[in-house]
């Protein structure tokens, strides 16, 4: 530390200067790459590390303002010259990230050899420990989550290196076939954070040889069920339930249902429902799965929301009703919350089963929890309320006459503006249709609301002063 004034202290350590150097290299990569070539090859490794970090960062958002407009990346040839200049600096995260930057490394054999050497023999990660971990949960890789493994895989040297090789496999099928041993090495790596990167290495083979890819993925998952939760795993599951692999993957999913890991059980729920919907599988297991633990049901709910909010699958949508009815009334609040948002999506209201789903929703215990979602959708997506007026009026009567908890009352009153607008729309449509029964029900609802004498109801009267109150 060095005082520069009465209240200013500057740090002049190697670490501080090296960090500043990294920022400078990011801002002007070509200039500092050329400068690096003039530096002694045995300078402090912190300087080498930060030079390489700067060269590896091609994200213009990380630049300082004065450099963004004219910034250009450093050429690949110049970057590799810097690596060669510091020969002997063979293992660091910055070096590995720089090497995996582009599949064009295949044209530079010495750089490719260096990348493969890191993938096969780097000491990082070490001893089945995690580099990134929650101190409360510990650093034991054998008992951590798949999400933790994936986060560590993109931060440990061997994991980063195998990820770079996966890019080359995508870019060059011939090279991929010639280097199947690298897939074997990743699968057999002693650290699960590296092992999970094997899924990325296998993914291109779904295009090259699907049977090979599906078999190796199956083997990998059997060795550690957490591998089934890799980011790319859905590609394999979506392709796997064919004649050749159906029974093996059904057996895998059944193992996942009883895994000790919550996210594996959630993935099992995703697969059970997706395969029931698309492949006609797990029909006998569905009822029991819908009463399984929360993780499994959260997986089912995730897929259900996807199906309910896309404009597709019209011929199969009746399969969704039973599952929706079960989960919207589930004992788990988290499962119910997962489903609540789909009612505000436009495609929910375009389905042949919309009226059936809405009736289930209206008769569930969650209907008052997210009135905003319901009212938003009615206001923005539903041109005519005639198909829904009976269930809406039933809901409004319940709101107006029931003894609500303080929490529910607060939710209802916060949406009173929108409620009264919808009530006015139902009333106006009934006037046009000369529907005396509906007109009478609308007036009953409004009378009951007025009896509450709440400020929110009084404020809402301005929206209907020319309608119901006229």
Image: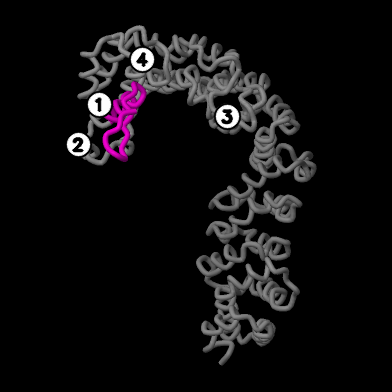
Q: How many marks?
A: 4
Residue shown at 67% from the left, 44% from the top: 298
Q: Please tell me which of labels 4 and 1 falls first in the chain.
A: 1
315 left or right of 108? right
* Vertical relation: 376 (above or below) 212: below
Q: Quadrant of residue 292?
A: top right
Q: Residues within 10 Å of mark 1 (few under 14, many from 20)?
A: many
Residue at mark 2? 70
Q: Nearer the viewer, residue 409 or 420?
A: 409
Q: Which residue is mark 1?
A: 29
Q: Residues within 10 Å of mark 3 (few under 14, many from 20)?
A: some
Q: Name the residue at 59% across, 80% down.
A: 455
Q: Position of residue 465 (x, y in %)?
A: 53, 88
Q: Magenta stretch containing residue 15, yes or no?
A: yes
Image depth: mark 3 or mark 1 in front: 3
Mark 1–mark 2 distance (CA, rounded to whole Å): 12 Å
Can residue 56 be seen from the camera position used here? no
Q: Which residues are magenta?
A: 1-26
């Amino acid at each position: 530390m060095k005082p520069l004034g009465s209240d200013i202290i500057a740090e002049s350590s190697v670490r501080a200067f090296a960090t500043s150097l990294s920022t400078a290299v990011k801002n002007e990569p070509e200039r500092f790459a050329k400068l690096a070539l003039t530096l002694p090859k045995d300078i402090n490794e912190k300087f080498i590390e930060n030079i390489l970090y700067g060269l590896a960062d091609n994200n213009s958002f990380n630049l300082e303002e004065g450099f963004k407009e004219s910034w250009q990346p450093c050429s690949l040839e110049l970057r590799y010259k810097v690596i060669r200049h510091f020969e002997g600096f063979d293992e660091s995260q910055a070096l590995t990230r720089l090497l995996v930057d582009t599949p064009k490394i295949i044209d530079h054999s010495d750089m490719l050899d260096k990348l493969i050497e890191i993938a096969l023999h780097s000491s990082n990660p070490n001893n089945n420990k995690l580099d990134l971990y929650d101190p409360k949960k510990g650093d034991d890789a054998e008992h951590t989550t798949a999400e933790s493994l994936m986060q560590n895989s993109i931060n440990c040297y061997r994991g980063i290196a195998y990820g770079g090789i996966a890019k080359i496999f995508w870019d060059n099928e011939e090279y991929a076939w010639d280097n199947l041993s690298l897939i074997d090495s990743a699968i057999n790596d002693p650290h699960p954070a590296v092992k999970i990167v094997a899924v990325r290495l296998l993914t291109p083979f779904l295009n090259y040889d699907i049977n090979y890819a599906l078999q190796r993925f199956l083997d990998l998952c059997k060795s550690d069920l957490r591998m089934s939760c890799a980011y790319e795993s859905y590609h394999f599951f979506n392709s796997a339930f064919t004649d050749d692999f159906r029974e093996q993957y059904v057996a895998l999913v059944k193992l996942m249902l009883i895994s000790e890991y919550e996210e594996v059980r959630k993935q099992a729920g995703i697969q059970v429902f997706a395969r029931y919907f698309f492949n006609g599988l797990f029909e006998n297991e569905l009822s029991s799965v819908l009463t399984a633990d929360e993780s499994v049901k959260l997986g089912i709910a995730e897929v259900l929301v996807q199906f309910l909010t896309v404009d597709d699958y019209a011929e199969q949508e009746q399969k969704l009703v039973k599952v929706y009815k079960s989960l919207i009334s589930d004992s788990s609040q988290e499962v119910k919350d997962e489903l609540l948002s789909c009612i505000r999506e436009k495609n929910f209201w375009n389905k042949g089963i919309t009226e059936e789903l809405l009736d289930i929703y209206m008769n569930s215990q969650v209907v008052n929890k997210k009135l905003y979602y319901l009212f938003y959708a009615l206001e923005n997506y539903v041109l005519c309320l005639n198909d829904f007026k009976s269930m809406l009026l039933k809901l409004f009567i319940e709101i107006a006459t029931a003894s609500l908890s303080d929490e529910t009352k607060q939710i209802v009153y916060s949406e009173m503006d929108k409620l009264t607008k919808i009530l006015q729309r139902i009333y106006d449509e009934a006037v046009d249709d000369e529907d005396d029964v509906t007109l009478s029900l609308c007036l009953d609802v409004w009378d009951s609301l007025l009896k509450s004498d709440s400020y929110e109801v009084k404020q809402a009267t301005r929206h209907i002063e020319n309608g119901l109150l006229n």
